[in-house]
Structure formats: structure tokens, C-alpha cells
Image: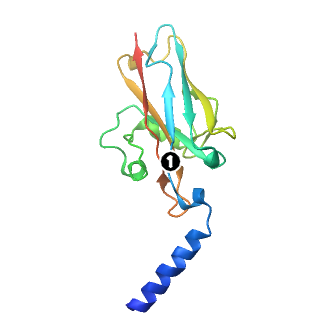
Amino acid sequence: MKLSTTSLRVLALASSFLLARTPAAAQDVCGGSAIAADVAFVSITQGGVQHLSLHVPPDESQIPWHLIGSMSGTHPGSAYFASGGLYLNQDRYMNLMATGHSPLVQGGTAEAYGVLVPFDTQGNARLRVVVPPGVYPALVGRTVRHGFYRFSSLTLLPHCGSNTVPLTFAP
């Protein structure tokens, strides 16, 4: 069925009206999601902790955001997450996190799609990447990266991806 020009105009007008009546956060306006880390290296021998500070605008703090990670870099990025601005390559670590398993990250709730980030009303959250001493010796020299995102209320795809932070495993 081919839509007429008039039908297309009516659909566009109706969409504009609905978006105008929808709160900004639900319109998928991205702004200000960021992640930072206090260290970039952790010793596999001694173990250690990387503290992650995450921030979103306060009006988006009650929207579910998920942390996800990758051990195989950021380029070109998984097409699924890159469509939302989060550039992490898909690998086993990402698959573990995306299926509700969080082997290193603490402070959030592991669930499907990654670790649910517990933001306060100001839009701040803190998580930890914990590396136990003597564990994962094959990881020496490898780097894991984490970033976070939320789902679009319009497309139900990843949206508003953050920057990523690295953690390199040292001897």
C-alpha cells in the first residue's frame, strides 16, 4: 500500500504532537553520560580494585542504565552497541556480562544486558572492578574496557552510550 502525501503529513504531525507531549528523557535526548576510573593498571599477582565513577544527568538517573565490557577493544565495535554510541567489540567477556554474569564488576546488579547501575538522584554511581590476587594469570598484558548505556524508549535498542575506560592487567 502506498501512502499519499497527505497521509504522510498527518503521520508526521501526529508524531510531532506525541513527541512534544513526551518528557525529554523519554524522547531519547542524550547528554552527559560519562565514566571515569581511578587507576588504569591492576596487578594480577597482588590483585586490586579499579573504582569506576559514572554520571548521567539527574533527570535520567531513574532510567535503567547498564554497564558492559569487552576484552577485545573498541574498534570497530559491536554493531548492536555502536548503534547507540557505545564502541566495544563483542567477545566472551561481553557475552558473560550480557547474560547476567559479572565476573569482575561489583556494586551493581548483574542482569541480562549487563550490570544495572545504581544511580543516585543526582545522577552519580560508583562501581568496582575487583581482580582477586593470583587469579587469571593468562590475562597479563590484556586490557578490559567498560562503558555503559541505556535502551531507547522509541526503538528499544542501545542508546546514549558513554565513553569507555581501560583496565590493563599487569604481572
Q: Of 147 and 16, which appears nearest the observer?
A: 16
Identify the secondary structure beneath mark 1. Answer: loop
Quarter of the figure with the C terminus: top left
Q: Position of residue 112 (x, y in %)?
A: 58, 46
Q: Position of residue 141 (x, y in %)?
A: 35, 18
The answer to whether residue 110 is above or below residue 153 is: above
Quarter of the figure with the N terminus: bottom left
The answer to whether residue 105 is above or below residue 19 is: above
Q: Of 121 and 108, which appears nearest the observer?
A: 121
Q: Does residue 96 appear left or right of residue 78 in this picture?
A: right
Q: Position of residue 92 (x, y in %)?
A: 42, 37
The answer to whether residue 113 is above or below residue 101 is: below
Residue extending farthest to the right is 121
> Which residue is painted at 52% across and 38% down in the image?
97
Say few, some or many: other residues with alpha carbon within 10 Å of mark 1 (under 14 / 14 to 19 / 20 or more).
Answer: few
Q: Does residue 119 appear left or right of residue 103 in this picture?
A: right
> Which residue is painted at 39% across and 18% down in the image?
138
* Label 1 sits on residue: 31
Q: Position of residue 113 (x, y in %)?
A: 54, 46
The answer to whether residue 155 is above or below residue 61 is: below
Total residue callouts: 1
Residue extending farthest to the top is 46
Residue type at tag 1: Gly
Q: Is there any visible trace of residue 3 in the rendered image?
A: no
Report which quarter residue 61 is drawn in: top right
- Scheme of colours in the image: rainbow
> Which residue is painted at 53% across and 14% down in the image?
48
> Which residue is painted at 53% across and 11% down in the image?
133
Q: Is there any visible trace of residue 83 in the rendered image?
A: yes
